[in-house]
Amino acid sequence: MPEEMSIDEFSVWIASDIQAVTEPSIDEQEGFTGFEYNLVQYDKDEYIKMLDEKNESLESQITDTQLVLCEVYEMLL
């Protein structure tokens, strides 16, 4: 099975939608057993930037959730 993330000297490779595939032999053509998946290559700086943006979004969502929980708590008092 392919790794979901692979890092080399210059890039980060992300595999997604990994599915096992088996195709039968037909006449003289040999069958295939393996995996199908989407593979995206990011340079390391691009990948770090993408992670930073996701972290900022998650932090914002956590803050919003905390504010809503505070409002609910105040309503209960």
Image: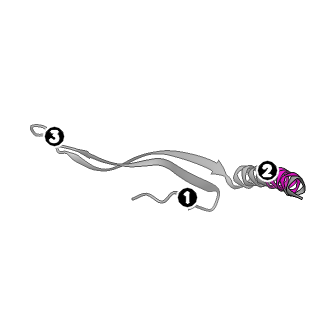
Q: Name which residue lies at 59% across and 48% down.
A: 41
- The amino acid pointed to by label 2 is Gln
- The amino acid pointed to by label 3 is Gln
Residue closer to the observer: 68 or 29? 68
| Quarter the C terminus occupies | bottom right
Among numbered discs 1 and 3, the one appearing first in the sequence: 1
- The amino acid pointed to by label 1 is Met
Residue 25: x, y in percent? Answer: 15, 42
Q: Name which residue lies at 59% across and 61% down.
A: 7
Residue closer to the observer: 59 or 21? 59
- What are the residue bounds of the magenta stretch? 59-72
Question: In front of the other: label 3 or label 2?
Answer: 2
Q: Which residue is mark 2?
A: 61
Magenta-span inclusion, residue 66: yes
Residue 75: x, y in percent? Answer: 88, 52
Q: Is residue 53 shown left or right of residue 2?
A: right
Q: Name which residue lies at 17% across and 43% down.
A: 24
Residue 30: x, y in percent? Answer: 17, 45
Extreme left residue here? 27
Q: Which residue is mark 3?
A: 29
Q: Is residue 59 shown left or right of residue 3?
A: right
- 53 over 27 or under it: above or below: below
Question: In front of the other: label 1 or label 3?
Answer: 1
Q: Secondary structure at mark 3?
A: loop
Among numbered discs 2 and 1, the one appearing first in the sequence: 1
Q: Quadrant of residue 11?
A: bottom right
Tag on residue 5? 1
Extreme front residue here? 77
Main secondary structure found in the magenta portion: helix
Question: What is the crowding at mark 1: few (fewer than 14 residues within 10 Å), some, or many (at least 20)?
Answer: few
Magenta-span inclusion, residue 63: yes
